[in-house]
Amino acid sequence: MKPVLILNGPNLNLLGQRQPEVYGRETLADVERLCAETASSLGLKTQFRQSNHEGALVEMIHEARAEAAAIVINPAAYTHTSVAILDALNAFDGPVIEVHISNVHKRESFRHHSYVSARADAVIAGCGTQGYALALHRVATLLKG
Ligand code: DHK
């Protein structure tokens, strides 16, 4: 079974330190641990990656075409700007789940639009880092189907 790629966009390397009132106090390492534990309970494997660079994220999605069964992506700020990430996801055949730690719809209006949602099979926002675990549960269901 191929792994589920869990992809994190810009500034998420600072999770736990930046705006904890918005994103919480857990770090990205905590999220990676949560994902590994959740995946193992579901019989899935994960590959956990982060980049601050749009092109690097696009290339990781290209690699996933051959190497991953599904993608869980928090594109962070690129959610609201990146046609390139949308196009890359459109070239990926498996399930795609979009995750936002915060409820983007409760925040500034520029966060209300997502390019990635045009491709995502599901969108999870406002569940904190638990959103990643919820996304993996949905991936497990979709991969069984
Ligand atoms: C993370 C970010 O860095 C923001 O740019 C997005 C997203 C929201 C999140 O909630 O995980 O607007």
Image (cartoon, grey):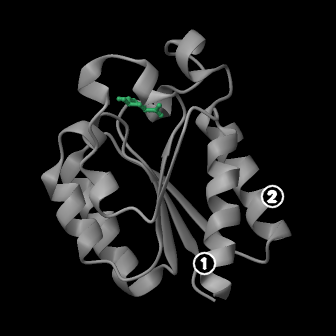
Asked if disc 1 and disc 2 are in contact, CB closer than 8 Å, the reply is: no
Residue at horizontal 28%, vertical 74%?
Answer: 62
Q: Earlier in the sequence, mark 1 or mark 2?
A: 2
Of residues 127 and 62, which is closer to you in this image? 127
Residue at horizontal 31%, vertical 39%?
Answer: 52
**Residue 44 spot, x, y in % from top left:** 71, 75
Q: Which residue is mark 1?
A: 142
Q: Is mark 1 within 8 Å of ligand 1?
A: no
The relative height of residue 89 versus residue 1 in the rendered view (above or below) is above
The relative height of residue 43 versus residue 25 in the rendered view (above or below) is below
Asked if residue 83 can be seen in this view, the reply is yes
Image quarter of the N terminus: bottom right
The relative height of residue 129 versus residue 50 in the rendered view (above or below) is above
The residue tagged with tag 1: helix, strand or loop?
helix
The relative height of residue 60 versus residue 113 in the rendered view (above or below) is below
Residue at horizontal 15%, vertical 57%?
Answer: 84
Amino acid carrying label 2: it is Glu
Amino acid carrying label 1: it is Leu
Q: Which residue is mark 2?
A: 37
Residue 44's disc is none
Asked if residue 45 can be seen in this view, the reply is no
Residue 94: image quadrant is bottom left
Residue at horizontal 23%, vertical 59%?
Answer: 86
